[in-house]
Every structure is written in structure tokens, then in C-alpha cells.
Amino acid sequence: MTGSPPRDRGVSRPILFFLAGPLVAVSCADGQPPRNLVLLSVDSLRADHVSALGRTNELRPDDLTTPAFDRLAAGGALFENAFSSSSWTLPAHASLMTGLPDELHGVHDNFQRLAPELDTMAELFSRRGYRTAGFFSGPNVHPVYGFGQGFDSYVDLSHVEVDPARLENHQPGDLRDVHLASHQAITSPALLRHASEFLEEAAAGDAPFFLFVHWWDPHYDYLAPPEYVARFVDPSYAGPVRGLHSAERVLRMQPEDLRHLRRLYDAEIRYTDDHIGELLDQLDSAGLADSTLVVWTADHGEEFHEHGRWGHQRTLFDDVVRVPLLMAGPGVPAGVRVGGIARLYDVLPTVAELLDLPLPGYVLGLSLAPLWRDPEHAGYPAVLRLAVPRQGYPVDLAAVRFGHAKVLEDRSNQRTVLYDLERDPGEQHPIPAAQLGIDHRSVLARAQAELEALERHKLRLPGRAQSAELPAELARQLGAAGYLGVDDDGAGED
Ligand SMILES: [Zn+2]
């Protein structure tokens, strides 16, 4: 079973039966194994803003934030406790694509790129004869970071053009045209159009395919089309919030402002979900749904002043690291809710198991199939990292999340704290050192062991992250989107 995946399954199945081991046990339960993969990642989609994970629209309860996500989840496995590897796009996608936590792929900030020696998901598929295509918007999944490796075509659909001089000394509201332009240019319709065209061609061809789409719209700013805003937002709101991050991140928000902000965010989520729903309908009508595994996730969440700020890439609290994750299609049981901890770096090993893809030996993630087979499975300890030393707001955090514990290590001041998420789900009250009991100490020791294991694992890696040379246009995009410390240096935050 090497080379291209079989086209004639009647012939190949007996061979699979003898050689593929556990794969058959999964696949036979639902008939044929999956032949294709569609991987969808939605930027900044916080887990608890997904309706299947609890978000409700108080104004119009029947108008869900994510009906397409919910429909797909009902026919597959929904991971209720899935975690990113970090709290922003670049390292999270590096983790998703390589099966490695941040400490191992080593891409921590906007000046580093993946080691070319690391195999990305697209490279593994390409080597097996798959057609591979990626469509993305947003500057942090740019090919300069290595994300184009293995794709036959990797198409940038983001266009934010702004004079860098305008990013300096601007007043609140000054950049509204830029944000509007970015909203109008970096939108779901272009992604849908390109991804649909690819599906059409793939359906007409013989080769199996891997399609990756990165949707950007729920990333701030929250500027959904007015008809969507009208469905989620209270028209009587009279405060200052318009959903513009660069201008409003420093506002002292009242509860009604935060409520309004989250409703604007919901409108963008629904706008994106509708486009993804259309793409999934096309998968169906092209006759591909029965042979295609769909994975839908997000790179990170968003903070809404739970810890004093709006945005992401500053902390490792669950608000920003817990993400939606579902898998649906052949090989995945329908209607399963998985409670065990899943990690973005487990997506590649799971996909590899279901599609019979050889995995490099250094991959640290594990298949998530055991979690949907065994409802008691606790999942795997999620190692989280945020280290952006060169972007104007030095942060150096590591965390380990398992059971209902989070151990959070601030390496800038050598301080380690423990949160009990069962008693303190909002992570507001680290357990005081004087109250640390023997159980707490064993939790701390286990977290320490997880982090130390990563250091040993580094010896197995074929290469290290390298410096990335940012094209001027990309640097402008990153600045306009609030990265590189240009527009969003954290100075106004706590
Ligand atoms: Zn992101």
C-alpha cells in the first residue's frame, strides 16, 4: 500500500484488510475509507461562539452563529475540548500542518519560517499522488513561512494595501477605510469561489485531492455586511463600539459594549459559516461527500476583556487557546461528542490514520480516533506556547493543559501558576502557593515532565526553523492587521 491511493476499491480492499491493521477497524464500520481531505480553518473562531458549543443569539434564538458547522458536527465527531498550540495564527498553523507543538516546529514569531526539512500535510499528500490546493486570506499563513510546501497551488486571496505612514500617529477612526477595504478584499466570497472551482475540477478528474481553505473574516475587525449585523446586533445599542480593533482596543468597555462587540463578532462568524456551508453543499452535489473526510477547526479564539483586553496573541487562557474541531466523513462515527483533550497537532496523525498516509517518525501528535472509540478517554496533554520576543510586546509563556488543570509558566519572570478549571473555569484565581497540596504538586510535576520531554524530542527533528525574509507587501499587511507591533503594540493594554 505505497504510492497513489487505490482508485478501484473493490480490488484494493482485500489488500488493505491484511496490511492496514487498525485502519480497517475504523473504516469498515462506515464502509469505504476516505479518499479525499478537505481541511477548513477559520481564523479567530473562539470555541464558545460556535452554536454547537453553546453560543446563543439572545435577540433571535433561532438564528444560529454556525448552522453549517452544527450540521456537519451532527454527522461526525465534535471535539468539545480541542486546543490550539498557541494563541495566534502563525504558530498554530505550523502546528496543524506538521503535527508538532510550537516548541518543536520552532516558528514562534513573524520572522521565522518552518524548517524545509519538516514534512507538511500537503507534502505528505502530494507524495502520494494527491492533487493539493490551498486558498487562504490573512498574512500569517503566507508561503514565506513555508505553508506553500507541497501544494500544487497555494493562492493568496488577501489584499490589504496601506501606506505605512498612515499606521503611525493615527486617531481612532482614521483607518476605517483601510479596515473596510481589508474586510471587502479579504472575504469569504473569493475563498468560496476558488475552492468551488477546485472541487469542480477535482470531481471531474481521477486523482484524490487535499483541499485546504483558511477563512479570515471572523478575525478583527468585525465588519460583517449590514444584513448580517441586523440579525445579531441590538439596534438600540448607543455606545462607542464599532468593532474596529486598532481604535477600540484601548477603550474601557462596559458590559453593554462587550455584549455589542461579541454580537458584531457573531455576525462575522455567521457570514463565514454561510460561505462554508455553501462549499459543503457543493461537496455533496459533486458526489464527493461520501468519499471525503472534512476537518473543520480554528487557529485560536479571542479575548473579550476576561483578562483585561480584546484580541489574541497575548495570553494562553482558554478564551484564546480552546478551538472548535470536528471531523466528519467516512471512517468517523456520526453524532459523537468527544470530551477528551484534543490538540491541533493531533489533526495530521488522525488524518494520516484515516487516509492511510505514512507519517514521519518525529511527529509528536497522536491519532484522535481512540477518543471517539472510547468515551472515557481523557485525551492528551496539550502543550501551549507563546513566545514573541521581537514584536514590540515581549511575551514568553508556556502552558500545559490536561484534565481540568492548566499549569502556566511565565518564563520572563520564572513564575509558574496552576489553575483548576473545574472550580475556576475563567482562570481568574491561580491556586496560591501556600495552598498547593500534594495533588497540586503532582500536577505541576507532570506538566514539567511534558515540557522536558519536548526538549529531548528536539534531537529527533530533521531541521530547525529558519529566518523568514518578509516581502515589503507582507510586512504592510501584517502591520495593517495589527501584527509586528506597528498598529497594535500593546502599549495601551494592561
Ligand atoms: Zn488567527
Image (cartoon, helix red, strand yellow):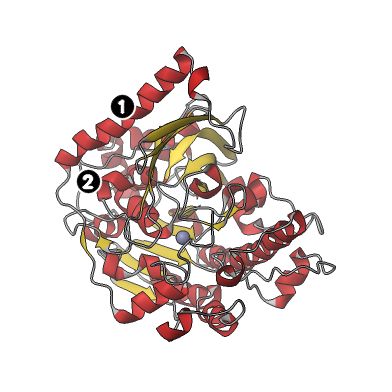
Q: Is residue 88 visible?
A: yes
* Pointer 1 residue: 449
Real-space Cα distance between discs 1 and 2? 37 Å
Looking at the image, which is closer to me, 257 or 405?
Answer: 257
SS class, disc 1 = helix
Number of residues whose C-alpha sits closer than 10 Å to that of mark 2, classed few (under 14), some (14–19) or many (20 or more) = few
Question: Could you say where residue 72 lies in the image, as x and y percent from the top left?
Answer: 58, 52
The kind of residue tagged 2 is Met
Residue 133 image point, x, y percent: 35, 68
Q: Nearer the viewer, mark 1 or mark 2?
A: 1
- Residue at image coords 49%, 62%: 491
Q: Position of residue 176 (x, y in %)?
A: 59, 81
Indicate the quadrant where residue 213 lies. bottom left
Mark number, residue 36: none
Give the mark, 1 or 2, whose residue is nearer the N terminus.
2
Number of other residues with Cα within 10 Å of mark 1, as a class: few under 14, some 14 to 19, many 20 or more: few
Q: Are marks 1 and 2 in contact (CB under 8 Å)?
A: no
Q: Residue at x 81, y 66 (%)?
A: 237
Q: Which residue is mark 2?
A: 1
Label 1 near ligand 1 (CB < 8 Å): no
Q: Residue at x 50, y 67 (%)?
A: 216
- Residue 379 lies, in percent from the top left, at 44, 31
**Residue 335 falls left or right of residue 447:** right
Above or below for 32 versus 200: above
